[in-house]
Image (spheres, coloured by chain):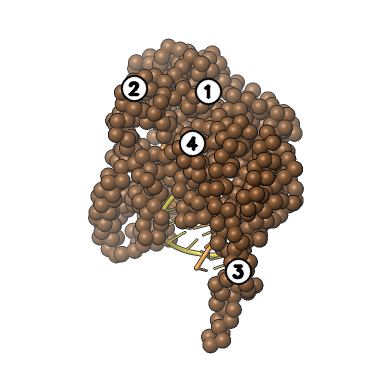
Chain colours: A brown, B orange, C yellow
Amino acid sequence: MHQLVTTPDQLHDTVAYFEAQDAFAFDVETVGEHRGVPAVNEITWLSLATKGACAVIPLGHPNGERLSKATRRKNKATGEWEPVPARFTDPPKQLRPSQTFAALENLFFSDRTKIAHNAPFDLLSVAKYFPGRGFPPPPYGDTIVAAWMLDENRLLGLKSLDRERYGLDYDHDNTGKCVEKHPFSQVQEYAYLDGRSTWLLWQDMRPRLTAEGLDDMWALEMDVLHCLLHMGQGVPVDTTALAELRTRLRAEMEHAEAEVYRAAGRVFNLGSVPQKQKILYEEQGLKPRKRTKTGAPSTDAEALAPYKGRNKVVSALLDYQEVSKILSTYVEGYLGTDEKPTQIFNGRIYPMLRQYGTVTGRFSCSAPNVQNWPRPDTVWGKAIRDLVDPLPGFKLLVADYAQIEQRILAHFAGAGALWQGFHDGIDAHTATAAAVFGVAPEDVTKQMRQVAKAIAFAINYGAGPQKVADMSHTTLRRAKQILATHEKQFPEVYRYKAKLLRTVRSRRPQPYLRTLLGRKRRLPDLLSHDSGRRAKAERQLVNSHIQGSNADMTKLAMVRLNRNRLPGMQILLSVHDEIAAMCPADIAEEGSRVLHDAMAGPEMQLLSVPVTTDVKICDRWSEAK
DNA sequence: CAATAGAGCGCT
DNA sequence: AAAGCGCTCTATTG
C-alpha cells in the first residue's frame, strides 16, 4: 500500500521516513506541450518508494473522479457515434510544488542513492524546482540502465519489465502518456505502481550486476549518467541563422521541385514511393537496378545512381531529395511548423543522449538526433553544424578519435602489419593497401586506399566479396582475389576472428562477448539452427566487439572530461568517436588540453597501439578541419 | 482518427 | 549474405 500525501503534515512524515533510508526510488509524471523535455516540462505527480514505504504526491492534477462512464454516445439525429468529452469532479486539495520540493530538497541533495527508471529524465525534471542548485548529486541508480546491461536484447520499458519479472500487468490505457486526461484515483494508482516497481526492480537487479561481473561497467555507466545530467543544459543554437537557412532551402526546394515536374512532363507527389516507381520505371522506361525487401523496384539513391546525369528526371529528383531532407529534418524539424512543435527552447536544443539506446553500448540520440548531422565536408553539413553557437566569450572545442575502430581491431588482432603500421605512425588504410598491393606506403594511390577502406568494412561489418567489389568499383573476381591476399598478409586478423567466435560460442547459458572494458553483448543466435541468423550473429560478433569497445572508450573519455572540466566549460555533444565542448575563450588552450587528455592522455592508452586525437579550437564547427 | 509499417536517408 | 542508430513522409490498418 501507499500513502497519498496532500497535507504538510503528511509531507513532513514522508520526508522523515525517506531521510532515514540510504536509497530511494522516485518517478515523476509530467504535463505540458513539452512534457518530454525535462528543461521545460511541469511535474504534476511525484511518487517515492523505498524499503517498507511508498508515497504518492499529487502536485496539481486537474481532475477528480470521472462523472460519466461513457466515452461515446449515439447522436439521435444522425445515428452516429460521437465522443463524449470527459467530465470530472473537482480534484482534492493538493500540495503546491514549491512547498513540496522545499521539503524534499535535503533528501534529493543528500548522499542517498537516487533511483529512477531512465533517471536523467526524472532528475532533470526535478532539478528545475531547485533553482540555483543545479541537479541532485550522485550516487544514482537507474533501473533502465541496469536492465539493459543485464540483457541488451530485451524490451526495457518499466511495464515490460514488470510483466516479465512479476507478471504484473497494470495500465492498459497508457495513463502516463497523458495523465491529465485521467481521473485522480487512476493516476494515483499508476504513479504508485511505477514508483514501487522501480524500487523492486532495483532490489532485484543491482545484485545481479555484481553476479555477472558488471560492477566496473556499472560504475562507469553511473558516471556517464552524471555527465549526461551536466549535458542537460543543452546546446545553444543560432536561431537567426536557422531561419535564414529555412528561407534559402525553401527557395532551392521550389526550384528543384519545378525541375522534376518539367523533366517528368507532369506533376506528382515527390514524396510518394509508388508514384516515383510509376514515373521512373513505367513512364521513363528505366530498368530497376534493385528491389526493396517486398520485391518492389527500389527508387533509392543507390538504385538511381547509374542514371544520374543521363536521365533528367533522376538528376532533378536526386537534387530535390537532398534539399528536401535537409529542410524537413534539420531545419523545419528544429524550428517547428504549424503541425510540429519547435525543439528549440531558450535558444537551445536539448538532444537526449540515451546511454542504453543501442545493443553495442553506444549512445543513441533523439529530439533532435544530432548524431546524424550531415558531414562537415558538405555544404549543408557546414550550415547545420554552424548552428551550434557558443555563448559570447566562449570557444568551441571539437575532437574525434583518429581511426579508432581500426586501432581497436589492431589491438585485438595483435602483432602484424596493421599493428606495426600504427606504431610506425602510418594511416591504417594506407598500411592495409601497401600490404595488399605489395607497394611502399608512399606509393599507395587514392584507389588503393579506397580498396583498403572496403576491406575494413568487410572485416568490421562482415561485408561479402560482392559488396567489396561494389565499394572498390571492381569485379567480383578481383574482389575475391584482393580478400584472399588480405588474408595472407594479415593472418592475425582472421585468427582473432576465429578465436573470438570459438570463445564466445562456448559460453553458457547463452553466448556473450565482453568488450574492452567488460561490457557484455549476448548473441544467442550464434547457436541458431537457422544458418542465415547464425551468419548474421557472426557478423554482429566482430562488429559489436569493436564498436562496443569504441563505445567504452568514448564513454570513459566523457566521464574523464566531466571530472576534469575547467570552470565554465560545458560538454555539448558526443557522436560515437567525437566529443564537442564549449569553453571560456580565455582558457580555451588549457581546455583543449583537458579534452585531449580525457580522450587520449596516458591513462587512456588502453590499447597495444597508440590512441590519438586532434582537438580543434574554433568559433564555428565548420572551421574545424 | 490514431497507430504502425515500409521506404528512404542522414550519421559513425 | 553490411554493423549500429533516429526522423520524415506516405500508405495501410485497426
Q: Quadrant of the C terminus of chain A?
A: top left
Residue that numbered label 4 is attached to: A133
Chain identity of mark 2: A
Q: Do dots 1 and 4 share one subunit? A: yes
- The numbered dot on residue A409 is 1
What chain is tagged by disc 4?
A
Asked whether disc 1 touches disc 3, contact meaning CB atoms under 8 Å apart, the reply is no
Amino acid type at circle 2 is Ile
What residue type is disc 1 on?
A: Leu
Residue A220 position (above or below residue A94): above
In the rendered structure, find residue A587 and report the number of the disc placed on it. 2
The tag earlier along the polypeptide, 3 or 4, is 3
Where disc 1 sits, the SS reads helix
Q: Bin the neighbour count of mark 1 within 10 Å (Cα to Cα): few under 14, some 14-19, many 20 and up.
A: many
Q: Nearer the viewer, mark 2 or mark 1?
A: 2
**Is A606 left or right of A212, judged from the image as shown?**
left
Spatial CA distance of label 2 from label 1 is 36 Å
Disc 2 vs disc 4: which is toward the camera?
4
Q: Mark 4 is on which residue type?
A: Arg
Mark 4 residue element: loop
Q: CA distance from mark 2 to mark 3?
A: 59 Å
Residue at 50 percent across and 41 percent down: it is A130
Closest to the observer: A126 or A174? A126
The residue identified by callout 3 is: A89
Amino acid tagged 3? Thr
Q: Choose top left, top right, bottom left or bottom right for residue A80.
A: bottom right
| Residue A472 relative to residue A536: left or right | left
Camera-side mark, 1 or 4: 4
Q: Nearer the viewer, residue A489 or A259?
A: A259
